[in-house]
Amino acid sequence: MNGQEWVERYRRDAFGDGQGGHGYEYASSPKVTLSASIESGRRESSIPVLNQRSYTGRKPVISSSLADTPCTSLGVKGLLRKLNAILSTSYMVETCPLSTFLEDYIGKGYDFGTVYGRLCPFCNRAVPWWVARQYPWAISHAWMDEKDRKDVHTPINECEWPMLMPRDADLDLIHIEMLNNGAEYVWLDVLCLRQKDKWQEEQREEQRVEWHDQHAERCDRCVEDWHAEQREEREDRRAEWAVDVSTIGRVYEMARKKQLVCYLSGLGRPFALKMDDLQSDRCWFRQVWTLQEVNKAVIIGGDTGDRFVEKGMRARVDEELSSLEESINAGDNDDDDDDDMGMPVFIALLEMRRRVSVDAVDKVSGLAYLLQTHEIPPYSVAESLEGAWTALVDELNMTYRGHLFFLYPKRGKNKLWRPSWRQAMEGTLLPPRLSDRDSGWSGNVRSPEERGVDCCDGPCINSGSDPYDSDGTFQERQFWVVGERLLGLKFKKVSVFQIPNKKDVKRLHKLGVTTNTKTFLA
């Protein structure tokens, strides 16, 4: 499903009745308090993040202990009694139309939080889109070193996979902080995106060794079965990640309509950055995926009242965020939201160069939403860098494809008309000041229906002088590509030159030696 199909399918949910109809009236609801001392067993005064100490309000929130209560222990009457008490209703089992559904939920072994999530957003449970039917808030966070993380199994995602959490963070405290920020539905990657289950792999390995010790004569079959299970699990994760990892950027786009909370010192941890932290590979500003997570409505999570913040650090963070927002929105059209093109391609590539990732292909995949591609190539860790880059370029809008053709100064290593991924990451790129979208463009590169067949629509001179280099202000038709015709009429790019003087550009135009031509590119 591409972006347009998504909008057409969910427009009513996101912009109409679904998005507007979720605004429950809580003014008459009783006040509820969630305390960190009850939720986590810690004294409130010992918790450095102020918004994680307690929440008091009229939103019908429930405690984690109630959410974890099995519905089988309540029965239909007990379940309905709890719901009536929380929602200030007075339904009877005999007349309640939900009774049949409640019986079904009990039969499925749901806990109270899962059932409550079908009725109200404050359930502290992972729920599917069709339950929320509104734009969620989003959480972005820096990743800690492996030695500073722990695996947490939680009923919030039905213990489907372990969450990777900082050792000193607590999900229940994050829940309280998000309530204080005003959130209803929140997207958090470690809860909503399947993680690699290291614990499960270790358990299976222990079981395999134990089985091998007991059945040595059948060890070959044991090893074969174990590897088959491992392969099946990896394939399931790859299939899920192919779609889910690729489309994470959409979540943060949706958060523009709501809010984004950034934990710059690690998920749920107090904001305590130091200047040296900005140079660390673990820094939020140096991670590949966080580049697509920036928007105009950032809340810095983990606020401690500045008790642990180095003087001037908050100002430095605000400066970094403003710079990122400016770069990301450089391709937006303020007059027409439908004409927004995303981050200019060379600015995005320069930004990716400065960032680090666990898997090399993440740098390519992390560009899709930034560059507003037509469709999103599926994510695969096994994909080669050049293969992933080619798939991405095939989906770029023709203006940014034109930038790769006209503004990259050298011949490409694979496709001659544009840089290879290695060239894009290591070669000389155009200065950002010359790569925005408002540069008087007159040539685009589009890809016909046949994949891999690229062509340029624009002015062409069939013969000319040798290329030369010059520096100057970018004007319409200032950049020209020099090359030669190959057999089959394909154009082989050799180099790029500039005409820095505007008068020279006009004089060339008046000569009448250019013709608008469709040129197929090698």
Image (tube, grey):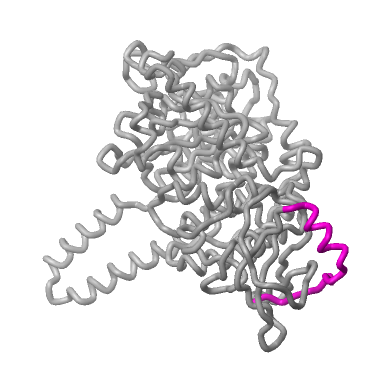
Q: Quadrant of the C terminus?
A: bottom right
Q: Position of residue 303 (x, y in %)?
A: 45, 20
Quadrant in which residue 97 is drawn: top right
Residue 362's place in the image compared with 20, above or below, is: below
Q: Is residue 170 visible?
A: yes
Quadrant in which residue 360 is drawn: bottom left
Tell me, yes or no, whether the highlighted magenta stretch contains residue 510: yes
Q: Nearer the viewer, residue 312 or 269?
A: 312
Name the residue: 41% across, 15% down: 306
Q: Quadrant of the N terminus?
A: bottom right
Q: Position of residue 405 (x, y in %)?
A: 65, 65
Q: Position of residue 490 (x, y in %)?
A: 69, 81
Q: Nearer the viewer, residue 304 or 52?
A: 304
Residue range corresponding to the magenta coloring: 501-522
Q: How many marks?
A: 0
Q: Position of residue 216 (x, y in %)?
A: 12, 72
Quadrant in which residue 465 is drawn: bottom right
Name the residue: 77% across, 73% down: 461
Residue 98's place in the image compared with 430, above or below, is: above
Tell me, yes or no, whether the highlighted magenta stretch contains residue 493: no
Which residue is most to the bottom? 487
Is 308 placed left or right of 301 in the picture? left
Is 33 placed left or right of 468 in the picture? left
Name the residue: 51% across, 53% down: 245
Q: Nearer the viewer, residue 17 or 101?
A: 17
Residue 508's place in the image compared with 147, above or below, is: below
Q: Is residue 240 visible?
A: no
Name the residue: 43% across, 42% down: 286
Q: Nearer the viewer, residue 374 or 506?
A: 506
